[in-house]
Amino acid sequence: MTATRRAFIFDMDGTIVDNMSFHTESWIAFFRRRGKDIDADEFFRTTAGRQGKEIIRSEMGEHLNDDEVRVLNDEKEVVYRELYEPHRKTVAGFDGLIALAKEMNVALAVATAAPNANITFTLDGLDLRRHFDTVVGAADVARGKPHPDVFLLAAERCGVAPEHCIVFEDAPLGVEAARRAGMRAVVLTTTLSADAFAEFDNVIHIASDFSELTIDALFSS
């Protein structure tokens, strides 16, 4: 009997790399230049996983056209990359986990709300892209998280049914997107404590990093 194909789908920011504080800092700087103060904790809880264009329209107005939003989002992302570049590295245990997953024939995917420039900055900057069967980003789907589109597309490209996928996430909107996709989730507490995920029935494990995760145990959960 042929073994069921399985997949790990990784959110990128805050999960593969511990960078969400830099994203939030860059958003705060971006909005402050425009006379708007935002609360960092609340901003992360309500926007992490949403696409930049969605955040800009939500905070600055739906009247903005696509070109205006693109220019503003590019400006914010330049600030982010300048802030984070000296600190760029994977979360502890990530490299070992994906190496073992590949040995076990587990499909690997990235599903992120990041634009292509940030995907290149992170995955190519750390020489990670070659490890993944597919990478799905903001340019590939119309809607960000909590909509399940990005996870469902990643699963489809891997040829794996949603129920055989495990999503790695760090944000409530991302865990909700996984739930809507019919996928179980592992939470990384790189930014929020475990309490922030208490309401989700699809969370099978919560960890500070990847170092103590066991692949067989995750799939048997």
Image (cartoon, grey):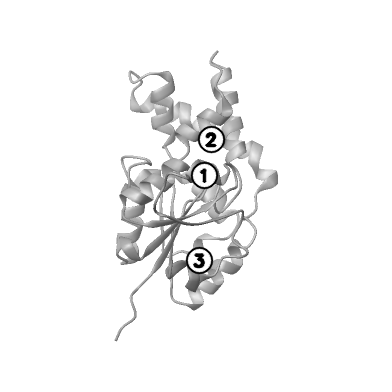
Mark 3 touching mark 1, by CB under 8 A?
Answer: no
Label 1 belongs to which residue? 118
What residue sits 41% from the left and 37% below the top? 51
* Residue matched to label 2: 77
Find out whether the residues at labels 2 and 1 contact each other: C-beta distance under 8 Å.
yes
Residues packed near mark 2 inside 10 Å, few (<14), some (14 to 19) or many (20 plus): many
Image quadrant for the N terminus?
bottom left
Q: Residue furthest top?
A: 35
Residue at (38, 62) in percent of width and height: 165
SS label for mark 3: helix
Q: Pointer 3: what residue?
A: 131
Q: Quadrant of the C terminus?
A: bottom left
- Tag 3: amino acid: His
N-terminal-most mark, 3 or 1: 1
Is residue 75 something one can see in this rendering? no
**In the rendered structure, which amino acid carries the disc numbered 1?**
Asn
State the image quarter where residue 52 is shown: top left
Q: Residues within 10 Å of mark 3 (few under 14, many from 20)?
A: some
